[in-house]
Amino acid sequence: MDKQHNKGFFFKQYEAPFQSPFDKLFSIFKELITHTSGDFDEAISWLRELDVEYKLTTPEYTIDDFIEDLKKKGYIREELKDDGTTGTGITAKTERAIRQSALDQIFGNIKKSGAGNHKTKQSGSGDEHTGELREFQFGDGLERISLTESLKNAQINNGVDNFMLTEQDLVVEETQFKAQMSTVLMIDISHSMILYGEDRITPAKKVAMALAELITTRYPKDTLDILVFGNDAWTIPIRDLPYLKVGPYHTNTVAGLQLAMDLLRRKRNTNKQIFMITDGKPSCVREKNGEYYMNSNGLDEYIVDKCYNQAQQARKLHIPITTFMIANDPYLQKFVNRFTEENQGKAFYTGLKGLGEMIFEDYETNRKKRIK
């Protein structure tokens, strides 16, 4: 009697993939070092507290063993502190691991591909094949001729016995131009980013790290500049993102926008955009004489009008601004609505949850169209 084999689904209890003791602690360590803005001693102190509460280690592999492995693997090093004493700091290898971790968390498991670029809807002598064929025309490069399709046409048109390839048999494959994208990411580091017991700077910092990793690995021909704005605005290198902290600042949105546009004016790319992450109202501008005009009470008309002027200026330069507003105050939303209207850009009113996904989706959407 033949044996019958039952087909169907087989269910079993989920088994987490194996992680070594080091990998398990390292994933937690990367989160902690981000929250502590690169302070190794504070991160390890938190890790020891978590170990006491959740039994993360065993007698065979302790926190001290983990620290020793961090040294051996090149994730930490001894360094000289500002006060002249020596301490432990993270290395560039750790900074890269943190950015990759942020990318995996926010954008999913995106792996490095070829030289990524931004597609446009214009067909022509570009460098990306579309799969669409057309007749050969004078001036088409020989490298664009589809040999297989052209030979097939020759056989159909002239027969196999008397094979002959003519110009009328030739077909070429359509290609698309690729447009590079230049992006400036503005991050608000005013004091309000940590007010009321809510840490808003860490999610913003994670988004910046993930976006930086995405662009440098998947779209290496694109450019990303990151600037922070408080009383003033200044750029920071990608490697400094883990150490980013909030300061005792007001919010000089105008300075941030002016710097962002100055950066983009220097780019040769046609496609340019500004992403702005903020949770507070503009409360500061710097006058021509170098003095600061500040007002944190409500929306100051003088400051707000200068913001609108910058939005209009960006529009004239064909630079759309996408604002990610981490606040739900009606009067602030009204300001952002007007600001967005002046620029003809976009605005998202969001909490901290889902911020990264929204920025990723908007970046991907923008890269598929040519910004005019």
Image (cartoon, helix red, strand yellow):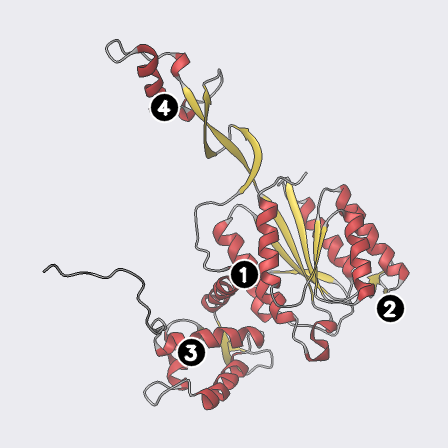
Q: Are marks 3 and 1 in contact (CB under 8 Å)?
A: no
- Mark 4 or mark 1: which comes first in sequence? 4
Q: Residue at x 40, y 13 (%)?
A: 167
Q: Position of residue 280 (x, y in %)?
A: 76, 67
Q: Is residue 282 visible?
A: no
Query: From the viewer's perspective, is 137 left or right of 199?
Result: left
Nearer the observer: mark 3 or 4; the answer is 4
Q: Position of residue 312 (x, y in %)?
A: 80, 47
Residue 210 badge: 1
**For the residue labelled by badge 3, is the local secondary structure a helix, a strand or a loop?**
helix
**For the residue labelled by badge 4, is the local secondary structure a helix, a strand or a loop?**
helix
Q: Amino acid at mark 1?
A: Ala
Where is mark 2, residue-wise?
298
Q: Residue at x 86, y 68 (%)?
A: 298
Where is mark 4, residue-wise?
149
- Give the distance between the C-alpha atoms of the residues marked 1 and 2, in whole angstroms: 33 Å
Query: Which of these two is toward me, 147 or 34?
Result: 147
Q: Amino acid at mark 4?
A: Glu
In the picture, the quarter occupied by the N terminus is bottom left
Q: Is residue 116 visible?
A: yes
- Mark 1 or mark 2: which comes first in sequence? 1
Nearer the observer: mark 4 or 2; the answer is 4
- Mark 3 or mark 1: which comes first in sequence? 3
- Give the distance between the C-alpha atoms of the residues marked 3 and 1, in whole angstroms: 21 Å
- Give the distance between the C-alpha atoms of the residues marked 2 and 3, in whole angstroms: 45 Å
Examine the rendered structure and indicate whether residue 319 appears above or below residue 284.
Answer: above
Residue 25 badge: 3
Q: Position of residue 226 (x, y in %)?
A: 63, 58
Query: Which of these two is toward me, 86 or 268?
Result: 268
**For the residue labelled by badge 2, is the local secondary structure a helix, a strand or a loop?**
loop
- Give the distance between the C-alpha atoms of the residues marked 3 and 4, in whole angstroms: 56 Å
Q: Position of residue 331 (x, y in %)?
A: 83, 64
